[in-house]
Image: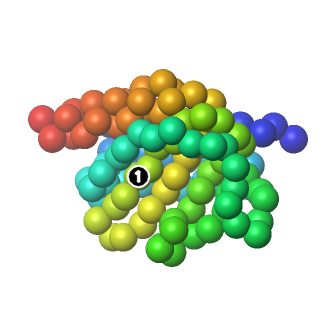
Amino acid sequence: MGQKLVVSVNPEAGAVTLQAPFYRSSIQLDDITSVEAHEDDGLNHGPVNWFVAGRADSPEGVRLNTGGKGRIDITTASGQHYSVVMDTLQQARDVKQAISAAWQVRGA
């Protein structure tokens, strides 16, 4: 089984798609209120040690994680929270930049 996470940014469709084993979610760019990049320890901090833990509409949000040192946190206007752990902090910064660039395309 492949253990990879995919973050797809599609400005034309106006969406960011998050994929993990047995999980897929699409977030509308217009609904995103913040995207931040942070360092991460790559561990799951709850009772479930799976690629996807939590729910987007819970206070802690959903965490997509196959281990790594960087993370993006996405918050939406509807109160959903998504955290995606990546191999490096630089990857997290690059994804944050891609989402920010897509916002600019949508806002143009």
| Residue under the point 57% across and 70% down | 55
Q: Is residue 29 above or below residue 106?
A: below
- Residue 98 in picture, x, y percent from top left: 37, 30
- Residue furthest out toward the left: 108
- Which amino acid type corresponds to the residue marked 1 in the rendered image? Ile
User: Is 39 on the left or on the right of 53, as rendered?
Assistant: left
Q: Where is residue 95 in the image (x, y as percent from the top left)?
A: 44, 32
Residue 80 can be seen in this image: yes
Figure quadrant of the N terminus: top right
- In the displayed structure, 97 sits above or below 29; it is above
Residue drawn at point x = 48 percent, y = 24 percent: 90
Q: How far from the left and from the top, in percent, is residue 81?
A: 45, 62
Note whether residue 8 is visible.
Answer: no
Residue farthest toward the bottom in the current orientation of the protein: 58
Rendered image coloring scheme: rainbow
Horizontal relation, residue 26 to residue 32: left or right? right
| Residue corresponding to mark 1 | 74
